[in-house]
Image: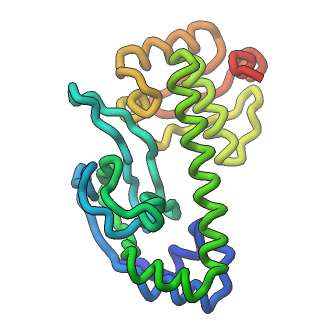
């Protein structure tokens, strides 16, 4: 069943605080698009003619090296937006996007959306705040991948996921991975074998307990002391 655009927009940080009239104006532009698992949403170099909101399912945004190695930049879930920067830049999509599960997206076409921003600049102001948060996430990702080893990246990821889910980072805290371990390995800039070894090392050190996709924090003080302050 197709979700109502207004319901999805209201749960999307980019638009959640818009007045009802502005929310309805944005919703009127939204076009539902469905994608099967592993189906491409767009490919790097495709013409960038709009951006997307995840209504249901999951999408990964990734780059491919010249050798075909995949580096996941983002894994997006319901209520999250992606490719917003094309509204201001245009041109081509700078990365690939692919559905990780059967997924419904709302597509917001560039030209009509820019016209709306020109008529209602308060929408643009709120969008700039969201893009600022996106830039910080990208800066954190670059720092994580370039300056830290795999173990530190993994601990940083666990800390961020606990924070995002409102779970205090203390002994006994439990977290269920929202994505598969192979996908997470790519997200952390490593290969599945190295990721598995790192996960096992943290468990052997008595810092975490792993049961499938569920991770329990055994010693929060020692685990998170790995992170730079």
* Total marks in image: 0
Based on the displayed image, in which of its 4 quarters is residue 35 positioned?
bottom left
Q: Nearer the viewer, residue 163 or 211?
A: 163
The location of residue 14, given as percent across then percent down, is 59, 67
Residue situated in front as seen by the camera: 12 or 91 = 91
Front residue (pair 90, 222): 90
- Above-or-below relation of 82 to 207: below
In the rendered view of the protein, which quadrant contains the C terminus?
Answer: top right
Quadrant occupied by the N terminus: bottom left
Q: Nearer the viewer, residue 127 or 222?
A: 127
The picture places residue 212, in percent across and down from the top left corner, at 45, 29
Residue shown at 63% from the left, 54% from the top = 132
Where 183 sits versus 52, above or below? above
Q: Does 56 sit left or right of 68 as displayed?
A: right
Q: Residue at x 28, y 35 (%)?
A: 64
Q: How is the image coloured?
A: rainbow
Q: Residue furthest bottom?
A: 21
Quarter of the view holding residue 11:
bottom right
Residue at 35 percent across and 16 percent down: it is 193
Q: State left or right for residue 114 relative to residue 161.
A: left
Q: Is residue 98 above or below residue 121?
A: above
Residue 70: percent from left, percent from top: 31, 33
At 38% from the left and 30% from the top, the residue drawn is 186
Q: Is residue 77 left or right of residue 144?
A: left
């Amino acid at each position: 069943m197709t979700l109502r655009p207004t319901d999805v927009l209201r749960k999307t940080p980019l638009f959640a605080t818009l007045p009802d009239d502005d929310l309805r104006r944005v919703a009127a532009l939204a076009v539902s698009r469905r994608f099967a698992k592993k189906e491409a949403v767009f490919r790097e170099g495709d013409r960038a003619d709009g951006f997307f909101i995840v209504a249901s399912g999951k999408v990964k945004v990734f780059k491919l090296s010249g050798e075909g190695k995949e580096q996941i930049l983002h894994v997006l879930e319901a209520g999250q937006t992606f490719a917003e920067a094309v509204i201001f830049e245009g041109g081509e999509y700078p990365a690939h996007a692919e559905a990780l599960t059967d997924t419904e997206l709302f597509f917001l076409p560039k030209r009509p959306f820019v016209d709306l921003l020109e008529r209602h600049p308060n929408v643009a102001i709120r969008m700039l705040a969201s893009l600022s948060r996106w830039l910080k996430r990208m800066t954190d990702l670059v720092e994580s991948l370039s300056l830290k080893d795999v173990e530190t990246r993994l601990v940083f990821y666990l800390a961020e996921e606990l924070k995002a889910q409102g779970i205090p980072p203390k002994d006994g805290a439990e977290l269920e991975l929202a994505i598969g371990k192979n996908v997470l390995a790519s997200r952390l800039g490593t290969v599945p074998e190295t990721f598995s070894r790192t996960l096992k090392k943290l468990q052997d050190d008595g810092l975490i307990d792993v049961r499938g996709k569920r991770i329990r924090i055994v010693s929060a003080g020692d685990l998170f002391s790995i992170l730079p302050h």
